[in-house]
Amino acid sequence: MAEEGHDRFWQLAEDFLARPGCTKSTMMGYPCLRRDGTFFACVHRDGSALIVKMSRADVKRVVDAGDAQPFAPNGRVFREWAAIPLDLSPSWAERMQEAWVFAGGAT
């Protein structure tokens, strides 16, 4: 699972890394992407999920629709982060784009 999830993430990341302001980084040990220094997407260490930063309303929307799970490392829910499981990886590109826009200050 790890390899498949990581491969999918980095394949999609290529498009973002070609954009001005996008850089590779880590967040709590997770490989991630930043936009002008702001974290916006990462892949779970075990490759099981894409984790994206979105508005609280958008996190609620995708979780309520069954398209994501709350991101809760160590049991603490991060309200502006959603985890999109690997089995929903066809939606990862769309979710990463939403996170990119959110990280740019769009509301």
Image: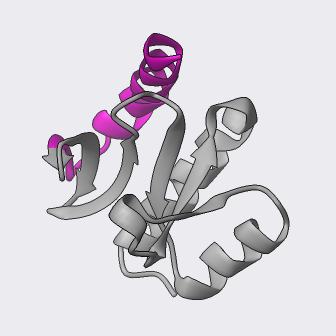
Residue at the outermost front position: 75
Give yes or no for residue 7 being in the magenta stretch. yes
Please give left or right for residue 24 compared with residue 57 in the image: left
The correct choice, above or below, for 96 with respect to 80 in the image is above
71 or 106: nearer the viewer: 71
1 or 53: nearer the viewer: 1
Magenta stretch: give its range.
Answer: 1-25
The correct choice, above or below, for 43 with respect to 12 in the image is below
The correct choice, above or below, for 22 with respect to 55 in the image is above
Q: Main secondary structure of the magenta part?
A: helix
Residue at the outermost top position: 3
10 or 49: nearer the viewer: 49
| Quadrant in the picture for residue 62 | bottom right
User: Which residue appears at 72% of the width and 68% of the height?
Assistant: 63
Give yes or no for residue 91 being in the magenta stretch. no
Residue 33 at what x, y percent from top left? 28, 46
Residue 106 at what x, y percent from top left? 46, 81
Residue 87 at what x, y percent from top left? 73, 31
35 or 49: nearer the viewer: 49
The correct choice, above or below, for 90 with respect to 100 in the image is above
Residue 93 at what x, y percent from top left? 60, 40
